[in-house]
Image: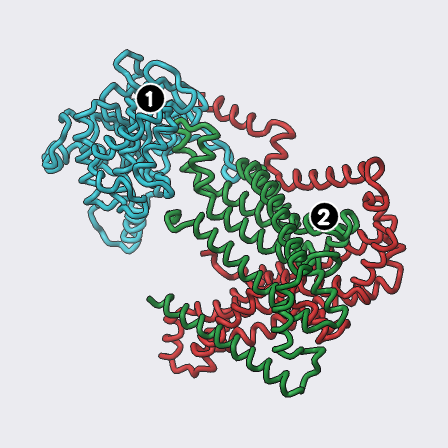
Amino acid sequence: MSDAVISGARIEAEAGARAFLHRNPAVARLGLVVLALALWELAGHTVLDPNFLSPPSAIVAAMPRVLGDPGVRSALVATFVELVTAFVLAVALGLAIGLVVGLSGFARRATLPLVLLLYSIPQVTILPLFVLYFGICAGSKIAFGVSHGIFPIILNVVAGVQSVEQAHLTAARSMGASRLLTIRRVVIPHTMPSLFTGLRLAMSATLLGVLLAELYVSTGGVGYYTRIFADSFDPPATFTLVAVLALMAVVLNEAVRIAERRASFWRTHR
Amino acid sequence: MRLVPVPDVTTQDAISVADVSHVYVRSDEGVVQTLNAVSLNVRKGELLCLIGPSGCGKSTLLNIVGGLVSPTAGEVRVHGHPVRGPAPKEIAYVFQENTLFPWNTILDNIKVALEFQGVPAAERQDRAKQAIEAVGLSEFANSYPHQLSGGMKQRASLARALSLQTDILLMDEPFAALDEQTRTYLGEELSVLLAATNKTIVLVTHSLSEAVFLADRVVVMTARPAEIKATISIKAPHPREPNFTTSPEFSDLRNEIYALLRDEIEKTVGGFVGRAAARDRERRAVAGERRPKS
Amino acid sequence: MKPRRFDWHARAIRVGFVLALLLFWYYLGRSGAVSAIFLPQLPRVAEKFVQILQSASFYNNLAVTLFELIVAVAIASLFGLTIGYLVGRSRYAVLVFEPLLAGIFAVPIIVFLPVFMLFFGIDIESKIAFGATYAFFPIVLNTIGGISQVDPRFITVSRSMGANEQQLFRRVLLPAALPVIVTGLRIGATIGFLAILGSEMIAGLRGLGSRVANLAEGMNTAEMFAYIVFVIILAGMLNLTLSTMQSRFAGPRNAS
């Protein structure tokens, strides 16, 4: 009797394609994306006005033309360089500031309210100021990106420094460690996990800052080309540009995610 | 091996479980059988305890009786009708963890339960108040669950179950999360309640003392896949006095149940004690010492 | 005791900082060390600030921006809450859709602004659509999270007492998920506002952001500063309103 019951359950568990999809939501997701693309393609040939939106096939067809233009290529490369530079600067500066603010109780009480105040300002409103002060070249875009990305780093590092358990600090001190040594051997390793958590937020923020600035400046860079393509009613070109930028964002986000995972593999899950 | 004869359904039975088996599929374990051809009857007005090693399937059996889980084979009948899903008018639940809604006061919690059951709005207030008074929580009717202690929360859960005025109460380790003192005290209260209301109660527990103190019958279950190992009757009438726990009858019953459980527990826990003792003996034999077997 | 003291302390620091900044700005302007194009003098900006508060064009722009915000958040909430509820109720749907939505949101949606402008033009429709899209994601993600993470024991016990789907929603799912959902709405409104400002600035005809961009282009720095100050104040007011609404709906008694 037992065997019949067990085999009955097994049979039910393995029935058909529906069950396969059930056990593999990732496949279902992929299927949905493919379906959406297919519908888009269909709509592009029937419903959509080619002046406003184009089907995926037209976009792919336009890619060589658009990406072949050296001006477009250099604008995209410049954007990528700005993104990486801004991110690295944001992390470096954020780490330094975060450590200083976090380690000194006085510094923390004095400056943390200010950091939070600055963080709460919608930075998009002062974008024109950045362009005014840093010009229309890469400088303003990098600066705007840093200005966005630095805050999650500072806040996470400060939180990380503060979370170092008093017990560890006392233990280090009782073993005769100097303040500097304590910082190197106890505080910094403890802060690393928080830093890495902040990296992802920082990358999102940096992406936002740099891309906002790029799109705002319509006299050069990516912003110039988006304007040109929009004015000349060239949807496939616009889409191509957007697609490449989106790809950049995905790649950078993934890179940070992998770095975060590599750095935390030794951490036990609490 | 079954020590209990296949039961007949009689009009005395509130619940009858016939040849119930349960199986589930887990991606990492494959097919797991929790219950194997379990049969038992619960008579009207009796308190039946299910006791067995951890993870053996007692809660699953309770959930099958309550209609929350379907058996893979076999049938459960409540008051003669087959169970096909939850039966809110006949069965009420009390769970181990607190399932009171934290966003409602105690009074509102009970009123919502009555709303679920389909009680007309006009009656809800009074019935809720009655239930709260029955467990002695009138003072806390307008408090929120997070303001109450663990014992009080379980009493509130009990009040909610009682307010539904069902004939049958299913309790899944209701006092397990409480400290021993509160647990003992609430057990005594439950005994008084049972005597007063003539409800049929099935209670799953880990605690031997609790089982012996509360139950009219104790059903001992084996390790997974669970079967019924033995059924022990306890003749003392309800409400049971606190000094019942110090009587020789109590100790005997407790020991009897433990003896039955011990093998099953060993299967679950892995027999640490047995294996350690065996290793010890081996070591001594190798060292040439002669010791009497423990 | 300690948090309250820190709060007073923090507030004093912030106020002190702002005052010091204003003083520094005033004296810097007076000294003539910085060109008025880069940093207009404080009295001039204050004067302009008062002026714009009396100008019709300012109120028109303010109305446009607020209108865009309200409509965008309304659309985002409608779609976000409904889809979030439907997806959240099914464990499988959560597994399929949640990573998809989270993945799309991980790409900064600002990137798609040119597409919105292509399709909707550069007037308020594109701002509303863009703002609504940006706001949609935190709302739907939080609603999915809130609904799907309702302690299943609450659902089990409700079912055992005879609750139907509608009762389950009103009495269990909604109150249980409300704090998370309200947080999502708050985040949605906040970033919706930023998205609208940003898109107005990048390419817009009307609205506060467009005005700031126009003033920047015309090197009309004093008035631009005045507008920027106002927008910062507006953002602060918006934040305060949202935070008050959030405390009302996600009160302490929901902590279980």
Q: Which chain, by letter, is green?
A: C
Q: Residue at x 57, y 68 (%)?
A: A151
Q: Which chain, by letter, is cyan?
A: B
Left or right, C41 with reference to C23: right
Q: Amino acid at mark 1?
A: Glu
Q: Which residue matches tag 2?
A: C125
| Residue A261 image offset from top left, x and y in percent | 58, 59
Q: Is residue B119 visible?
A: yes
Q: Which residue matches tag 1?
A: B90
| Residue C232 image offset from top left, x and y in percent | 59, 65
Subunit ID for the residue under disc 1: B
Q: Are marks 2 and 1 on the same chain?
A: no
Quarter where residue A128 is shown: bottom right
Q: Colour of chain A?
A: red
| Residue C131 image offset from top left, x and y in percent | 66, 51
Q: Is residue B65 visible?
A: no
